[in-house]
Image: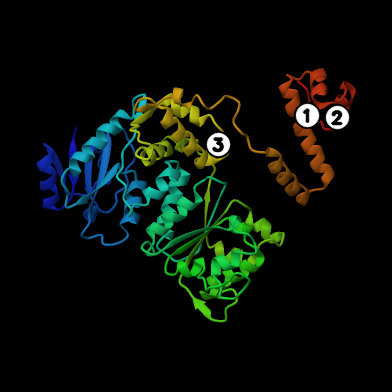
Amino acid sequence: MKVSVITKDENVYRDIKKYFKNVNLIEENIKDLKLEGIVFVNIQDFGIVPFSTSPGTFPIAIIDKNAVKSNLAALIMKIMSNNYFDYIEYPFKKNDLEKVLKNINKKEKDEKEIYYIRKKETDETILCQYLCSIIGSSPYMKNICKLAGEVAPTDLPVLIIGETGTGKELFARGLWKLSKRKDKPFIAINCAAIPENLIESELFGYEKGAFTGAETQKKGKFEIANGGTIFLDEIGEMPLEAQSKLLRVLQEGSFYRVGGEEEINVDVRVIAATNKDLSQMVKEGKFREDLYYRLNVITFKLPPLRERKEDIPYIVECIINKNNKKINKNIEGFTKDYIEKLKSRYWKGNIRELENVVIRSMVFCRDSILSITDLEFLEEGKEEIPDLYDKLKDIIEQLINHENAKQTKEKIEKILIENVLKKSNFNLSKSAQILGINRATLRKKLEKLNINIK
């Protein structure tokens, strides 16, 4: 395999040449060059030159760890988002170059029927530890990852929107690990799990004697998180009174403990998450408008897994790497039919449900490769489909806000009848039976709703 080194540093070239034979040295900008094989790029000299993914080309970014003293995780994320195969730190450690070659050999095997996973060493400073299991490779998620790298170093509040199981807390932890607060606490609170009468004391603490049973002073989660990050999951479940206190923290950086008179000052970054439509809750008076605008400075929307199934192989790889040791397994890859089976499902529970299924299949697997036989516990037709009537109810409510109820009724009835006709191959008698009406009534409805029968 060809090996090229793009660098102006002779030491970098010399060290790579010790390991690889016939190394091609390039000391100019590679923007217009067509390269193949292993391509080492010294980003200290040329910056992060974007690559287009092509078979047989493996760009490797060289990072001078002495020059990059901070924000290493953000740099790595930017490198990977520009289609680099991997990165390596310089000066090289023992076996670093050997590991690169092994990873490339595994990548070449990926194009076969069996996909072999890349075993990544856990590194607390790398965003991937938290986000690899939710990001994937789809363009939309790559853009989210790029934006995360830009937003994370700031202190701006962040709102994460997504269905249950889409990885909102993992995403929040990734933002924390990329921030300057990464060495300070990360406190996660599920607002939906705390009783309404206890949420204020839980978040802001209380003084001795503040209420029956308050025998000692207790710090709240905001005090504990001082200097760090607090993650408020299911923020839409927070009572209005507690929302007022949260707004004060965001505006002034201070609050009072329950039953207290001393003002407590804190420096906390707030990341909130919800699976609800907060803007609609504002209209209904269930969520403070001023708090909504405070939180909605930077918003990340994590799509459901069913809308990005192309990411499933990547996510499965991360789940395997994460759990191999935990369940005493050595799963090395999976077959194409295994992935196709996973892609065929709806995934109401999103990534959380997918992870449970993959782990269970790992337990059942008798060798090192996951195959469709390891998914036999997934009964055909038994998948739990979400209650679509709730969604239909929401749609109808929105339609009624824009037109009268009669128009909405006729549109819904027309859609229903058209679908029943298709299902029955336009057999009127069968369609009428399905709809629970007689044939004459159906004919009248077809004429009234202007439905043509072929």
Task: Give the camera-side residue of 395 and 284.
Answer: 284
Contact? badges 1 and 2 (CB < 8 Å): yes
Taking 313 as reference, is 15 above or below it?
below
- The span from disc 2 to disc 3 (Cα, nearest Å) is 37 Å
| Label of residue 445 in the image | 2
Taking 396 as reference, is 209 above or below it?
below
Residue 198 appears in which quarter of the rendering?
Answer: bottom right
Q: Position of residue 450 (x, y in %)?
A: 82, 31
Q: Residues within 10 Å of mark 1 (few under 14, many from 20)?
A: many
Q: Position of residue 444 (x, y in %)?
A: 88, 27
Query: Looking at the figure, which quarter contains the N terminus?
Result: top left
Tell me the kind of residue under disc 1. Answer: Ile
Task: Give the camera-side residue of 357 and 424.
Answer: 357
Tell me the kind of residue under disc 2. Answer: Lys
| Label of residue 347 in the image | 3
Q: Residues within 10 Å of mark 3 (few under 14, many from 20)?
A: many
Q: Is residue 37 visible?
A: yes
- The span from disc 1 to disc 2 (Cα, nearest Å) is 9 Å
Q: Position of residue 124 (x, y in %)?
A: 33, 53
- SS of the residue at dot 2? helix
Tell me the kind of residue under disc 3. Answer: Trp
| Label of residue 398 in the image | none
Upstream in sequence: badge 1 or badge 3: 3
- SS of the residue at dot 3? loop
Q: Residue at x 50, y 24 (%)?
A: 376
Task: Give the camera-side residue of 217 and 404.
Answer: 217
Q: Residues within 10 Å of mark 2 (few under 14, many from 20)?
A: some
Residue that extends furthest to the bottom in the rendered view of this protein: 261
Taking 278 as reference, is 320 above or below it?
above
In this rendering, position of residue 391 left or right of residue 363 = right
Residue that badge 1 annotates: 417
Upstream in sequence: badge 2 or badge 3: 3
